[in-house]
Image (cartoon, rainbow, N blue to C red):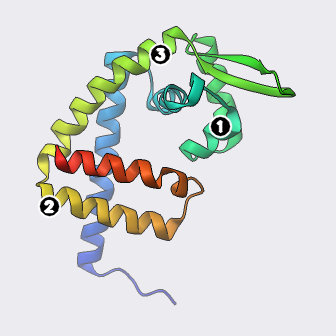
Amino acid sequence: MTRPLSDREREVWRSFHVMRRQLDLTLERRLLADAGISSADFEILLSLREADGERLRAGRIADLIGWEKSRVSHQLTRMETRGLVARENCDDDARGVWIVITETGRQSVDHAIGDRAAVIRDYFLDQLTVDEQQQLVDVSRRVLERLAPPVCDELDDEARVDAEASVNG
């Protein structure tokens, strides 16, 4: 039988959970207000923006952002309707389709990146000391190693570079 959480453990979990949820809500509201896109749009557009040729297969997007393929498919349909992404046939696979970012999608995500960074810095990073930031990186990496999501190995080097950049200013 699993032992119940202590009062302290409940406090740690609850404060983390509420903080993360409120930070996510704040980021979502700012994305909608400032760039006119949702966090779901942002995740997909950012994946495309960072990809070679700014295009990916839908299954790869699902892997990168940790979603089910059906959810990605539905989101891509909504985004295509709004002109944020387009579908292109894959030359080397007759059944394959590339998801590509459009100019509208590129402008939206580029606008959102700057504002998102300011919000993350203001509401989160500026509230932590450099040592606390490094501790959070260390804790996050340990938890991710335990969870072992499928893209952790690929994102490992990128996360290390991002963490070092945030700690070093």
Reading the image, the residue beneath label 3 is 106
Amino acid of disc 3: Arg
Percent across and percent down for residue 94 are: 88, 25
The reply to whether discs 1 and 2 touch (Cβ–Cβ < 8 Å) is: no
Amino acid of disc 1: Arg
Which of discs 1 and 2 lies nearer the camera? The answer is 2
Instruction: Identify the element where label 2 is drawn.
Output: helix
Does 10 appear above or below 70? Answer: below
Which callout, 1 or 3, points at the residue further toward the start of the chain?
1
Q: Nearer the viewer, residue 147 or 28?
A: 147
Reading the image, the residue beneath label 1 is 71
Residue lying farthest to the right in this orientation: 94
Reading the image, the residue beneath label 2 is 131
**Residue shown at 61%/28% (left/top)?**
75
Which of discs 1 and 3 lies nearer the camera? The answer is 3
Q: Relative to residue 87, is residue 4 drawn left or right? A: left
* Rendered-image quadrant of the C terminus: top left
Instruction: Identify the element where label 3 is drawn.
Output: helix
